[in-house]
Amino acid sequence: MIEAHKDYAGAKLGMWLFLFTEVVLFGGLFLLYSAYLHRYHLDFHHAARNLDTFLGGANTIILITSSFFMAMSITALQLGRRGRCLGLLALTVLMALGFLANKAIEWWAKFEHGIFPGSEHLRALPQGEEIFYSLYFAMTGLHGIHVLLGVGILSFVMILVRRGRVRQEDFVILENSGLYWHLVDLIWIFLFPLFYLIT
Amino acid sequence: MSLTGIKAGASPRGFLSSPQDAGGLRSWIFSTDHKRIGLLYLACILTLFAAGVALGLIMRLKLITPGNDLLAPQTYNAVFTVHGVIMIFLVVIPSIPASFGNILLPLHIGAEDVSFPRLNLFSWWLYLTGAVVALVSIFTGSGAPDTGWTFYVPFSERTTTNVSVAVMAVFILGFSSILTGLNFITTIHQLRAPGMTWRRLSLFVWSLYATAWVQVLATPILGITVLLVFAERVLNLGLFDPGRGGDPLLYQHLFWIYSHPAVYIMILPAMGVISDIIPVFARKRIFGYNMIAFSSLTIASVGSLVWAHHMFTSGMSDLAVLVFSFLTFIVAVPSAIKIFNWLSTLYKGSIIVEPPLLFTLGFIWMFSVGGLTGLIQGAAGADIHVHDTYFIVAHFHYVIFGGTGLGMFAAMHFWFPKIFGRMYNRRTAAAAFWIILLGMNVLYFPMFILGLMGMPRRYYDYPAQFAQGQLISTVGSWILAMGLALMFYNLYAGVRRGAAAGPNPWGAATLEWTLPSPPPSGNFAEIPEVEKGPYDFAPDPRHD
Amino acid sequence: MAELDKRHAPHILSDRLLATVWATLVCLTAITIAVARIDLGFYNILAALSIATTKALLVIFFFMHMKYEHALLKWLLFLACVVLAIFIGLTFFDVAFRLQVRS
């Protein structure tokens, strides 16, 4: 059987390759963003003022902290401290849910103001501002889906750790899930300044 | 399964047969054996190929005379769209890597399997799901998609046909392709047998490696592009809608950033097959091994820089036209390097003409015609005249069908005895080859002339001055269909009642031929120690 | 002939190091917000992206353990980033040089 000799480095290489595809997937949107920023830079500046830097900044801190907990949970498992690892993972998931709640509040406020794709309010704005919001919803939306997937993956890994399928001697699944989670953080690190800080 | 009916040879058991109590369909569709997965892919690809060919034949029949109304205009639009979607995303992209790549990669590098066998099975299931969703898009909703396989905005955002479902099928298929690429890269890095250095890899493996990188790094762009088309339709984003400040040309950029490198996903593995077949039938070490391996990587990398040559007439900036035209000419160089190396390998070789070599030579002819006419379109000035005409249609059918298609057929004839342990009728195979080659040229060559005369592609009808060329082309499609039918019948007969082929009927030197035919389930009894290159042939038994 | 060692030699990062990285990331976030409030014109974008890149590198090298991985993996990551940069960069030959009809 293939499972007989585990190839840890291979599993990690495979995971990194997958992360590359995620980077390029978002890259397509970053391409659109940069092209439209070039064309409508003034409109982008105007539109960005309506985004709440406080909420965006808070979400940045939340994600960075969740990444920190994620990294610590790997350290904990490597040292054989399973309970601590589980606790840290739970914190990570909690942070992720906090991020999503925050995001939901933010989107909801936008909807209340009549700002959603194709809305009449948006159509009345200059074209560049409408494009800005379309990109905002597309990119933060796709990122949000990734956060949601991350919550699912990390919860699943918690079950595996509890059952001892992921343990001190065999934790590549935890490591790879961690890599995925850090990637979600990485994307946000770029989304934050591009949408909230170009006022 | 008819395949499982083959008698197991001497032990160990070949991968085609299952243990007494574990046979049947389940032992195939849930198998993680890379060879079985490869055959699953092959079966699906060939089935869908038949569907694509049937649609092509219908189109040609409709175009046989001006004013012909065999198909309604809307149906005609749907037929060329579905023909394109099936042929590109379900047949040609997965063609060689997913089928022969899966079967042969671990054998060529001396491994038990690929790095992630379950992921491999998962990508086949994704492929199957994508195929089903594509079929659903044809038969449900308000009609099959009518955008052409390129899904160009803004039309694809506005048409009421079933584009949303079709693009989701493409997204799923892209994901399947990515996972295959990821698996292959990891396998090639991690699972090579002891002694299997990078310079002892077969050129087929090199081509798979280069292809896999394109799959991993370019396919996600397709993913996001079709997701955006979906979002535009469902969520009304307006990112590509010129009426709302969007730029449709950015869609074209995104689409071709993937879809041009995709051309190399299609052709590189075929080039790898050709590079592996030629030395065997010339009984000579390949000429310029390093350059062929290197040119695979060059094609993959430079090929990712030329996408906008599909957009010369789109209204993009003149500077971009200049830059992309220049880059396009560069990518011709590594392709030419390969052709020269293949010809140099044949030169003064002791050539034995067998069906795989015939298909290989057919590849070189068709690919050269297709490649050189590609340069005409790469030159921005000339492209203005031939853009969106039959000239383009002829060009890419020469490259994709004449190139990848014949490369795939060459692979089928070359590795058939290894996979099935039996031999097909070689004379019939040769006859089928000549009919196919004739059919292809009669079908597609007139399109070059029609294109130069000004016949636009994807048009429902045409004036009388194009009638002659269209008629010849349609006759060609019948010849081609007969050749294909004969070839597939011959292979099928070979599977059923061909003579036993033995482990190495061609006298080839790559690792898979050291195994019994068909190879046993676990491949090598012991992981081999590799001490020589893939083209260091034993003394030729035929001359002893 | 595996490039990467199949045996698994874990590198354990201390909580202390991770906490330092975390603190740096939080500081950089504060800095980027502060810098955005000063009007530097085009340089605002440049500053924001430089800081974001620095943060990304910290996450990649420490949280994602890249510092301790084989050189091959670092090169592949570099390759992926270069490819993305090329995709965006070459598109700008069109986007930045197109004659636009301004309304």
Image (cartoon, rainbow, N blue to C red):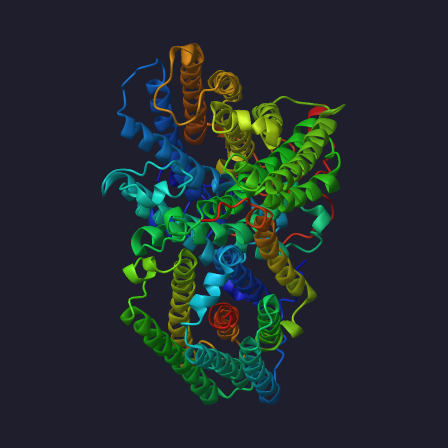
Q: Residue at x 30, y 16 (%)?
A: B68
Is residue B102 visible in the rendered image? The answer is no
Is residue B289 visible in the rendered image? The answer is yes
The image shows residue A75 at horizontal and vertical percentages of 55, 83
Query: Which is more toward the observer, C86 or B31?
Result: C86
* Count of labels in the image: 0
- Give residue B82's quadrant in the image: top left
For this orientation, the residue located farthest to the front is: C103
The image shows residue B346 at horizontal and vertical percentages of 71, 26
Q: Is residue A165 above or below residue B516?
A: below
The image shows residue B444 at horizontal and vertical percentages of 49, 20
Q: Is residue B264 above or below residue B500?
A: below
The image shows residue B195 at horizontal and vertical percentages of 71, 53
Q: Is residue B222 left or right of residue B323?
A: left
Q: Residue at x 52, y 17 (%)?
A: B434
Query: Which is more toward the observer, B401 or C54?
Result: C54
- Give residue A149's quadrant in the image: bottom left
